[in-house]
Amino acid sequence: MKHVIDRLNAHGIRLSRDRTGALRAGPASAVTPELAALIRDHRAALLAALAPPPDPAVVLEFYEERAAIFEYEADQPRAQAEAAALRRTLERFALPDPGTGGIDAVIAALTARRANPSAS
């Protein structure tokens, strides 16, 4: 998604969400038909990229609840329960896979993004 945003920025187009959550791109004079199609094709991902990140505490609570459910109600070993809980958490909050860092990497990334929203 970063490549789409970078391409739009290179043409002087700035993206934002208005108070209703709608995607805005401007200035209008810089939006060519080709760039308008690019924006249309990637609207959902662009809106997601512009959305504020979820609260790390909420994400962690969701993860911990799912891990407990998988472990105690589905009788899964703890490591398997945590892996399943991580997958479910990433899906629920539309977060990227942290690789080997697990939930700690997810929480660290969210905390950093909330501290510096312009860097995301």
Image (cartoon, grey):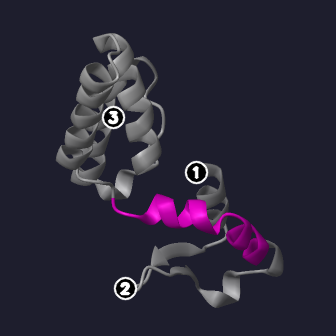
User: Closer to the N terminus: mark 1 or mark 2?
Assistant: 1
At 23% across and 36% down in the image, what residue appears?
65
For image coordinates 60% across by 74% down, the residue present is 13
Decide whether residue 44 is among the magenta residues: yes
Image quadrant assignment for residue 100: top left
> Which of these two is toward me, 10 or 22?
22
Q: For mark 1, give the secondary structure.
A: helix
Give the amino acid at mark 3. Val
Percent across and percent down for residue 39 are: 68, 71
Reading the image, the residue beneath label 1 is 2
Looking at the image, do the residues carrying marks 1 and 3 touch, with CB atoms under 8 Å apart?
no
Query: In this view of the protein, which residue sits in the foreground, 3 or 78?
Result: 78
Using the numbered discs, state the Cα–Cα distance from disc 1 to disc 2 in whole angstroms: 23 Å
**Range of magenta residues:** 35-52
Residue 8 picture location, percent across and down: 64, 66
At horizontal 38% and vertical 30% (from top left) the residue drawn is 86
Residue placed under numbered mark 2 in the picture: 19
Q: Residue furthest right?
A: 34
